[in-house]
Image (tube, coloured by chain):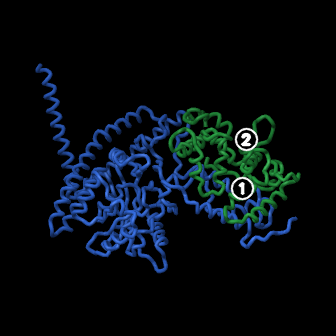
Amino acid sequence: MSWLTLPVDLLSKYLGLFTDVWLTLVFGFLIVPAVFGVPFGIHKYYIKILLSIFEWTTLQMELKAKEKNNQLYKHYTSGIIVKVPDSTLKQEIQDLRCSAGCLSLDPRLELADVFVFCRKALENIIDDDVTKRFSAQKLENWNLLTRSNHNFRYINLKLLALWILGVLIRYGVLLPFRVTVAVTGIFLFVVLSTVVGLIPCTKTYLSDKVHLMGYRLCVRSLTGIITYHNRENKPKNDGICVANHTTPIDGIVLANDHCYSLVGQLHGGLLGLIQRAMVKSSPHMWFERAEVKDRRLVAKRLRDHVADENKHPVLIFPEGTCVNNTSVMMFRKGSFEIGCTVYPAAIKYDPRFGDAFWNSSKFGLVGYLLRMMSSWAIVCSVWYLPPMNRKEGEDAMQFANRVKAAIAAQGGLVDLIWDAGLKRTKVKDTFKEEQQQLYSKILLGDHEYQNHPES
Amino acid sequence: MGSSRSSLRGVPDGQQLLQETGFSAALLLRLHQRFQFLDKDSRGHLRSEDLEAELSENPIGDRIVGAFFQPGQETVDFPSFVRVLAHFRPTEKNWTRDGVQPEPANSRNRKLKFAFQLYDQDRDGKISRTELLQVLREMLGLQVTEEQLQSIAERAIQEADLDRDDAICFDEFRKSLEKVDIDHKMSVRFLE
């Protein structure tokens, strides 16, 4: 039976060789440089190549579509309808009545008034500002990921071959690499962080290094290509850093460049293990689930932390939940009530290489990470904005809105007043009441309505 | 644009809807996308909760959602959805009633009928005083007293009710809105 063992021998020899080569590559090119902070170097070319491939694929699909005399289904990122900008209820009703020949806004009902409410309602049904922020952004060009393609019938053989090649590369080469790096990174980080925590002196210096290394490895494991702008505005130890929230990776993206103290809920399992290891070498603030609800306790801990100038700036995401990176939603005012300097940062992801948005209603964390690791890359830009302080006579909410506007302007995002909690709950009745109030003023006039004699 | 048959493959009753509603194929596709987005559990039809979620700030939101559903039905499929939306296309100026083609959904008459049915919930062809009071209460909420509400309703009925039967029928409704630019106010400008 020696002819059976021969292929098995060969197989195991090649497998061993393969593993050796692979491990060398991974360690040599990814892990060791990440540990020491040496840049890898080929990212620019990688991106250029990918971009030209994506343009070519979209061209192919357009050509094929033309053959069939059809239009390629392009996602209009601006919407389905033309929205009249900011016309108030009063204006609309006035227009309506003027067209019917009424001279002034008489305090009376016109049967046509219902049209105005009706049209607004239809516009909201067809296309609204809020809910489309909670699903992934649509792309103009196809990036060879099934998840962002809506023109399946226009794929010809060339494209299909390219797509299969893409799948093989992403799942066969990139994903295993990334998973290895991630696992090694987490392992190293947990061990080193615990070790550093045991050393009494030079704790801050070493722990900073260990943390930065950990984050670098995580970023490499996702092929994160991050460009930092305005580094002179980097947060200092006396304040908090706030940023818009798109994904759990936001923290890693920011912490890759500077050391922060994180705030959050203490989890169980692997995440909890990592959290506990982190705390050993650097003062992060993890709260038990019950404590999270106690706002005063949280605020006090934050205040104490910020007052200590040896501790790193606190990293906070005031939106409270993940939004799809086309807009910035309402900031919770809690972090702005502390009274310290706020260092805003804007994070903008480039969706062409991989959609970073975590749609928590669609995928769990593990599913999300797998999707991240099988995308082409996570490309993003981080802008550090100049520090802001609360002005005289400004309350926390106004301050929060000012910071939010600055972040939105820098990142090229839409500044919305809506609460990101709308992802899970409905709009409160206050908005409906506002509309009713406005309309009642029109019907009754701004003065008290007197019963006038019947005509 | 050539054959649009294949591009509407995923859209139920696509071809027929093209004819009926006058929407372009591209727009129909986008509306289908929107429908699928609103249909969060991918059932293929919408329930009132799915639509109400978009209209929470509108005082007559529930009423408008009701307009999508046939009496007794609890779900609305895509063709019905689009047929309602078709009422809100801007009116074509050159359509004339020649008795051969069916009246398009976005004619002035059909728009008026849609609005009339918002008032006339029991579909008896008349807007009774009670129905008018109901709409007013919805649009004004708790901002006005009962007396004020009654006065406003009274005046509105007096002005529109020509045959003195204490209700507003469709013709009276139409007459009172003769001069209103309905096309502008009851149309949504679609990006074609």
Counting from the top left corner in percent of width and height, residue A224 is at 32, 53
Residue at the spot of label 2: B104
Of circles 2 and 1, the one toward us is 1
Disc 2 from disc 1: Cα separation: 27 Å
Counting from the top left corner in percent of width and height, residue A140 is at 48, 47
Which chain is painted in green?
B
Any part of residue B27 in sight: yes
The crowd level at tag 1 (other Cα within 10 Å; few <14, some 14-19, many 20+) is many
Q: Colour of chain A?
A: blue
Q: Nearer the viewer, residue B48 or A49?
A: B48
Against A302, is A377 above or below? above
**Number of dots carrying numbers:** 2
Comes first in the chain, label 2 or label 1: 2
Q: Nearer the viewer, residue A394 or B29?
A: A394
Which corner quadrant holds the C terminus of chain A? bottom right
Name, please, the residue furthest toward the bottom: A392
Q: Residue at x 55, y 60 (%)?
A: A428
Counting from the top left corner in percent of width and height, residue B12 is at 59, 35
Residue at the spot of label 1: B135
- Amino acid type, label 2: Pro
